[in-house]
Amino acid sequence: MTMARSGASASLIDNKKIYVFGGCWDWDVAADSSNWAEVYDVETGTWEFLSVVTPKMPLKIQQSLVMDDEKHVHAVDEDGQIFNFSSTECKFEAAEDGRTESNPSNWLFADQALFCPATGGRILWRFPFESDWKDVKGLEQLQQQHSGFHIIKLSISGVRLAIFWEARPQGPDGQILELWYAELSIATRRIEGVFELSVANIEWSGAVLSLDSSSTGLLNLLFADSFYL
């Protein structure tokens, strides 16, 4: 990049350009709006600064997602303020209703909805234009089998939702740390005009990795994605 950045947002749009916003920690530099955003052209392999119309230049972008149309980016800054970026208009605008985000990280966008993990093995979802997060129903079986489990990563594959979490087997194997994976089929229904998402079926569930926790400590899964073979 042209500038050193930390806590920036990077979004690939149309498989042609990578748009980068924020992350300028030098206040003298960050105050200059011409340095706040830059774009990488995949075809030419070059960076250039981007002149963006924006009401605010967030220092740190907590999370950003490219929408289905591949022209817009949905983002939230470190204060929880929501922004939308249009690559065709080159505008970075705050949400019109001024709402803020209560779950600013680890989102996924699929089938027109946002998803994120929550405490107690819960998965939350909402539409981008809504403020309130709702629970994905039907996770009780996993929550009972793995009391207190905490989802550390989500992934989407078609109409299926994949989740990863860590577990410590009870008994003599208590020093073993396991990475578990479950693949869930998601069903949508509308009740009195209100959409509800629920787990239709647990397609598969099991441990995919075992480690000696006395030497490894905590498990940190950095990235997970879906692909077809």
Image (tube, rainbow, N blue to C red):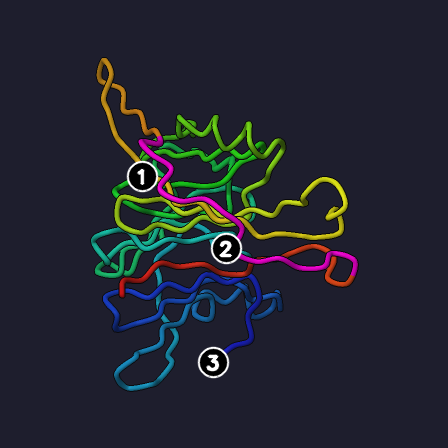
Looking at the image, tell me whether mark 3 or mark 2 is earlier in sequence order.
3
Q: Residues within 10 Å of mark 3 (few under 14, many from 20)?
A: few
| Rendered view: 156 above or below 87 | above
In the image, which residues are magenta? 199-214
Q: Residue at x 50, y 63 (%)?
A: 8
Looking at the image, tell me whether mark 2 or mark 1 is earlier in sequence order.
2
Q: Position of residue 208 (x, y in %)?
A: 52, 55
Q: In the rendered structure, are the residues bearing label 3 and label 2 in contact, judged by CB atoms less than 8 Å apart?
A: no
Q: How far is the residue under mark 3 from the one under mark 2?
A: 18 Å
- What number is the disc on residue 185? 1
Q: Secondary structure at mark 2?
A: strand
| Rendered view: 32 above or below 3 | above
Tell how many labels. Answer: 3
Q: Is residue 38 left or right of residue 220?
A: left
Residue type at tag 3? Thr
Residue 9 placement: quadrant: bottom left
Q: Is residue 74 left or right of residue 35?
A: left
The answer, for residue 189, to whether it is visible in the render is: yes
Q: Residue at x 61, y 65 (%)?
A: 25
